[in-house]
Image (cartoon, grey):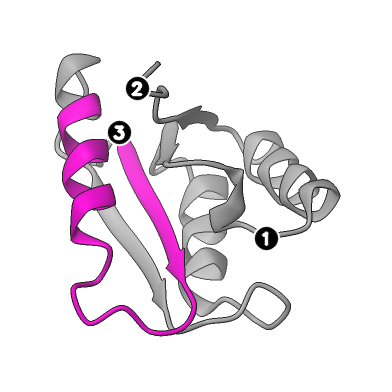
Amino acid sequence: MTDSCAIYLRCHPRDAWEMDAHRRALEDHARKLGLHRPAVYLDNGVPSRGPAPRRTDLAHAVRAGRYRVVLIPGPWVFSLDASTAHRIAGTLAAGGCEIVELPSRR
């Protein structure tokens, strides 16, 4: 059975807890949306201006049809530059998935 959703997280500098709070919040959000338990793709310690190996792996999986939803805490996980983040999200969406951001607490 293929997974229906994935989580993408990136943190720089390296996060010893591997963004646990964001991961748990996204897993809870997936559950509320009725999605399967998400696979987690984490680029830990990877700056936004360099290669992101796990994001590349995720993009390949999306294009292969493995995921229909990618959950993120916000576009900053793709890049701190808003236009770059938007372009990366668009590339993933063009591969066949919906990008779903964690709702704000407001």
- The residue singled out by tag 3 in the image is 4
Quadrant where the N terminus lies? top left
Q: Quadrant of residue 44?
A: bottom left
Label 2 sits on what residue type? Arg
In depth, the one of 32 and 70 nearer the eye is: 32
Question: Which residue, given by chain and number where applicable, does mark 1 sit on?
Answer: 79
Q: Position of residue 46 (x, y in %)?
A: 52, 82
The one nearer the camera, 65 or 25, is 25
Q: Residue at x 54, y 56 (%)?
A: 77
Q: Are marks 3 and 1 in contact (CB under 8 Å)?
A: no
Residue 77 position (above or below residue 105): below
Question: Which amino acid type is marked by label 3?
Answer: Ser
Vertical arrangement, residue 69 with respect to residue 51, above or below: above
Whichever of labels 3 and 1 marks the residue nearer the N terminus, that label is 3
Find numbered disc 1 in the image and state the secondary structure of the residue it sits on.
loop
User: Between tags 3 and 1, which lies in front?
Assistant: 1
Near mark 3 (Cα within 10 A), the count class, few <14, some 14-19 or many ≥20, is some
Is 10 placed left or right of 35 in the picture?
A: right
Disc 2 designates what residue? 105
| Part of the protein shown in magenta | 5-29
Whether residue 1 is visible here, answered yes or no, is no
